[in-house]
Image: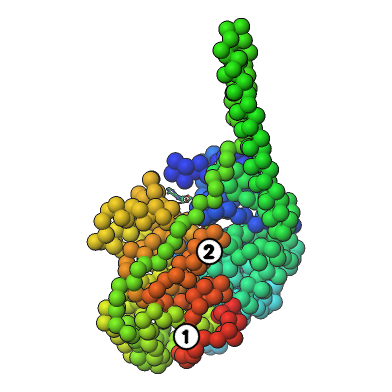
């Protein structure tokens, strides 16, 4: 259970939340929602005890499992499987058992050997007492469901992709929380848990979370997940610095919020009408000296009427996202021949050929780990192939949007980041561009590393726009975006005249792209797009 009392949260000088009292109890499955930048991640960090509130207090009883939105940097030399097992302290026990086993096999001295046998017996007893053997297979089961095959689990974290690392973290947290079955005492705090999951994993996660009784707060842009899982909703409204608590499931929440919005608008309209009438009356009466006091009172009442209203919610402002005007280029701006890539002993793909025609729309499909991100990195030139080559055609200009936002410099400000992406663009033009992407004022000086997930996505897209790229390489461009901003990206995709190579789990993004070609990894098979491939998108 987690309780937060009189919570005040700030971002710089902005007040995100003030005077909120929040409680997460067993049986709660809470969806924490709000626009990009509203303060969802900030709130969750504080609930997890990893961030200090500006004012107020947070207390937790029982264990808390927290999945942050960004993959965190821990000890990267640890093997993935041990990282998962460490959640219940089983990794060190297993290692020591292995050591004792070797000692038993190798020690010839009778007394020493007997000691090793006793040591092994003792360790094994503890391992079994902790539910070790069952737990180990439980961990393996969770990992499989989250798209982490045995092969990946034996690799050190350092060699894993950002998505794989996050899945390992998620597996670790769910493994810890599954101690005690659905009676688990762990409160789960999950910030965008589906970002790197394929459809099968998401389906499994949904049922896992629906059965979890220890208390849950989940931030997700996946409304299907919210609809399936949550029984309460916290709506974080940045314009009022408040959390509206809805003790109901997702469908009823959507209705209730629509009703609330309507009521607010109606109340405001009524109050404004009344106040206007009072003011008009006061003005008339004010002309007569005998009625001056009454007129003043009337005017005051009108003002009070307006002051008593909840502040008007800023109409949900939305970025007007457009992709660049592509610079002219030859008929086939980008080709690749015989691309191969391996990490250590793990071959991702080999012998991939492809050609991207001017204005072509290409979707890259493949299961988790089939190398989609790797292929885009090779095409973007941020990674070199082990064999084969990427050939630039006449006039090629690529614009790369990276899944993990690694094209952004986290230390540099919002302004410096776009400046860097477009060194020749006049200052005023850049300001206007940033404005349409909803960056202005103080936020221009904010270090990119402190931006919210959705804001980072927006900034990276703004960088693309200023680039005049004629081949866009887009890796999950709709991740982290709130529904209104996602629509904008889809619209931009529909209109873009240049070529696009797209990696996505989002069927809506594929439909918006209206692809003419598909590349299926790891084989690198090229095919004409057909509707049957749409099913693969969700599996991918
Ligand atoms: N050091 C900082 N200085 C100024 N503003 C900051 C700082 N750190 C965070 N912010 C701002 O605080 C706001 C809340 O961020 P937060 O990450 O909590 O949003 P979020 O609701 O999780 O958004 P998203 O849906 O995009 O993940 C954002 O506008 C962010 O830019
Ligand atoms: Mg966030």
Q: Nearer the viewer, residue 461 or 20?
A: 461
Toward which corner of the image does residue 292 lie, by quadrant?
A: top right
Residue 414 occupies which quadrant of the picture?
bottom left
Q: Is residue 466 above or below residue 343?
A: above
2 or 1: tag closer to the N-terminus: 2
The image position of residue 408, as x and y in percent, is: 37, 63
Residue at horizontal 39 percent and vertical 49 percent from the top: 440
Instruction: Name the spot of residue 104 as percent of width and height, x first.
Output: 57, 84
**Residue 359 horizontal side relative to residue 537, left or right:** left
Q: Residue, x 68% and y 55% (percent of image)?
A: 254
3D distance between C-alphas at marks 2 and 1: 23 Å
Classify mark 1: residues with Cα within 10 Å, few (<14), some (14-19) or many (20+): some
Residue at 29 percent across and 82 percent down: it is 330
Label of residue 203 in the image: none
Q: Is residue 383 left or right of residue 41?
A: left
The residue labelled by disc 2 is 487
Question: What residue appears at the point 29 percent right and 76 percent down from the top-left corner?
Answer: 328
Asked if one can make out residue 123 in the rendered structure from this viewpoint, the answer is no
Between 94 and 458, which is closer to the camera in this rendering? 458
User: Percent from the top left, x then y, of residue 100?
Assistant: 56, 80
Q: Position of residue 166 (x, y in %)?
A: 52, 69
Q: How many marks?
A: 2
| Among the 4 quarters of the image, the one containing residue 136 | bottom right
Disc 1 residue lies near ligand 1 with CB under 8 A: no
- For label 1, the SS is strand
Task: Judge from the rendering whether residue 257 lies leftward or rightward of residue 77; answer left or right.
Answer: right
Q: Which element is circle 2 on?
A: helix
**Which quarter of the rendered picture does the C terminus lie within?**
bottom right
Q: Which residue is mark 1?
A: 517
468 vs 264: above or below: below
The image shows residue 215, relative to residue 110, as above or below, that is above
């Amino acid at each position: 259970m987690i309780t937060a009392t009189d919570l005040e949260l700030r971002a710089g000088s902005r007040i995100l939340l003030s005077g909120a009292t929040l409680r997460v109890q067993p049986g709660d499955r809470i969806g924490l929602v709000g626009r990009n930048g509203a303060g969802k991640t900030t709130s969750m960090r504080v609930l997890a005890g990893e961030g200090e509130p500006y004012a107020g207090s947070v207390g937790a009883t029982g264990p808390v499992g927290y999945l942050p939105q960004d993959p965190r940097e821990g000890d990267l030399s640890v093997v993935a499987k041990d990282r998962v097992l460490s959640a219940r302290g089983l990794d060190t026990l297993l290692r020591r058992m292995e050591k004792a086993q070797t000692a038993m096999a190798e020690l010839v001295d009778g007394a020493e050997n007997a000691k090793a046998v006793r040591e092994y017996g003792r360790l094994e007893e503890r391992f079994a007492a902790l539910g070790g053997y069952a737990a180990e297979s439980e961990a393996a089961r969770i990992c499989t469901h989250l798209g982490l095959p045995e092969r990946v689990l034996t690799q050190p974290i350092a060699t894993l992709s950002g998505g794989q690392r996050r899945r390992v973290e998620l597996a670790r947290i769910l493994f810890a929380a599954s101690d005690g079955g659905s009676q688990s005492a762990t409160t789960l705090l999950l910030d965008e848990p589906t970002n790197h999951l394929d459809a099968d994993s998401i389906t499994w996660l949904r049922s896992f979370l629906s059965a979890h009784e220890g208390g849950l707060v989940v931030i997700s842009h996946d409304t299907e997940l919210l609809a399936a899982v949550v029984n309460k909703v916290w709506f974080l409204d940045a314009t009022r610095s408040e959390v509206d608590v809805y003790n109901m499931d997702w469908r009823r929440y959507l209705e209730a919020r629509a009703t609330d919005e309507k009521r607010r608008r109606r109340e405001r309209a009524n109050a404004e009408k009344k106040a206007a009438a009072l003011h008009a009356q006061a003005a008339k009466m004010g002309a007569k000296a005998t009625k001056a006091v009454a007129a003043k009172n009337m005017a005051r009442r009108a003002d009070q009427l307006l002051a008593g209203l909840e502040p008007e919610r800023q109409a949900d402002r939305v970025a007007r996202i457009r992709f660049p005007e592509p610079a002219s280029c030859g008929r086939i701006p980008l080709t690749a021949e015989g691309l191969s890539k391996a990490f250590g002993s793990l071959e991702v793909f080999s012998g991939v050929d492809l050609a991207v025609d001017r204005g072509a729309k290409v979707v890259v499909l493949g299961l988790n780990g089939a190398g989609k991100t790797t292929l885009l990195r090779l095409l973007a030139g941020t990674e070199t192939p082990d064999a084969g080559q990427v050939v630039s055609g006449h006039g090629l200009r690529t614009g790369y949007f990276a899944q993990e936002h690694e094209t952004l410099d986290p230390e540099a400000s919002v302004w410096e980041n776009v400046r860097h992406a477009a060194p020749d663009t006049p200052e005023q033009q850049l300001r206007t561009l940033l404005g349409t992407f909803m960056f202005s004022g103080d936020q221009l000086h904010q270090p990119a590393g402190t931006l919210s997930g959705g804001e980072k996505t927006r900034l990276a897209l703004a960088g693309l726009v200023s680039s005049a790229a004629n081949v866009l390489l887009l890796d999950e461009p709709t991740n982290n975006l709130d529904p209104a901003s996602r629509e904008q990206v889809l619209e931009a995709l529909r209109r873009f005249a240049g070529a696009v190579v797209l990696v996505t789990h989002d069927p809506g993004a594929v439909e918006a792209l209206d692809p003419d070609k598909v590349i299926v990894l790891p084989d690198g098979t090229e095919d004409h797009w057909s509707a049957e491939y749409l099913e693969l998108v969700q599996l991918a």
